[in-house]
Image (cartoon, rainbow, N blue to C red):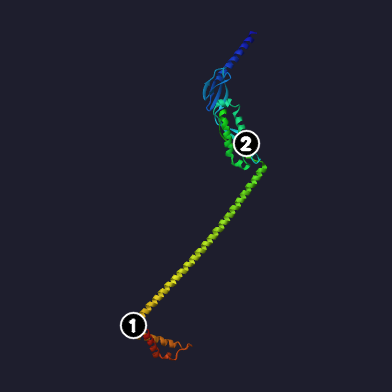
Amino acid sequence: MSDIIDLIVLAIWGIIVLVVLVKLFQVMQIVPTRSARIVERLGKYNRTLDAGFHALIPFVEKVTFIQDLKEETIDVPPQECFSKDEVQVEVDGVIYISVVDPQKASYGVEDYRYAAVQLAQTTTRSVIGTLDLDRTFEERDIISAKVVEVLDAVGGSWGINVHRYEIKNIVPPETVKNAMEKGVNAERERRAILASSEGDKQSRINRSEGLKAEAINRSEGEMQRRINEAEGKAAEILEIAKAKSESIAKIANSISAPGGMEAMRLTLGEQYLKTLDGLEASKIVLPANLVDYEQWMEKVGLQEGAED
């Protein structure tokens, strides 16, 4: 009987020692970097343990909350929202937050993660309700900024900091999606047709400008050719006139020189005789006294004397 009592006592002491050892291990707290632990003393908040080694009072103090201070991402589940034009869309997103005040994050709200998700969903629904369907795809930044603004307003009391909110997907119904795809295809075809017409128009303009330039170049070339020909003929006429003038001047000088008149009469006589030789086959009617060379020369001489 005494052996049984001794075993019971030994077991009780063993349990007590084990509890004491467990408590000793519990009072020794090693807090890692970017973490914080909330300590309560007799059920009341006492202090916040930062990174490092800490010791608690056994059976009086205990760690009630462990908060991670690193930035974390929280998925916002898909939810159905109605746009301003009464189109139902499914929206989901992700929140990037971090704990900045471990005490408020522990006591200010029961679960700050769940609360942030709920507030993000309600804010997203309210913002999308003010936008038409087309703008919901274009104004993602506005929706995200509004959600961050609302979460920041309550983040101070919850001990959290909301860094950003991103919308992952905005999914419209299949009927709306098909209609949007048809509209996109129609717009793409319209742009292709417009681009083709603009290209054809530009091609025609370029071709006409080329023909115009070619015609101008040809006309300018023809004009320059005629100018050159005219200038050449004018120069030729001037040279001929100059040569004739010089020839006449030389003849006049020769006639006025001593013996020049006799030489002139002799030259005209030779030309007269040559002319008579060529009249045998001609039907030209000449005066009867044309053969009288002396009389003809006298008339020429008298005419020349009259001219002198």
Residue type (three-letter) at the residue carrying disc 1: Ser
**Image height check: is 4 above or below 54?**
above
Mark seen at residue 292: none
Q: Which residue is mark 2?
A: 126
The image position of residue 200, as x and y in percent, is 58, 56
Relative image position of residue 297 (x, y in whole percent): 39, 88
Q: Which mark is residue 256?
A: 1
Q: Position of residue 142 (x, y in %)?
A: 58, 38
Please rate how many residues cluster around mark 2, counting C-alpha atoms within 10 Å: few if below 14, some from 14 to 19, many from 20.
some
Q: Amino acid at mark 2?
A: Ser
Residue at the extreme left of the image, as rendered: 258
C-alpha distance separating marks 2 and 1: 126 Å
Q: Nearer the viewer, residue 122 or 220?
A: 122
Q: Quadrant of residue 41?
A: top right
Q: Is residue 223 above or below residue 149?
A: below
Q: Quadrant of residue 253?
A: bottom left
Quarter residue 255 falls in: bottom left
Q: Nearer the viewer, residue 94 or 245?
A: 245
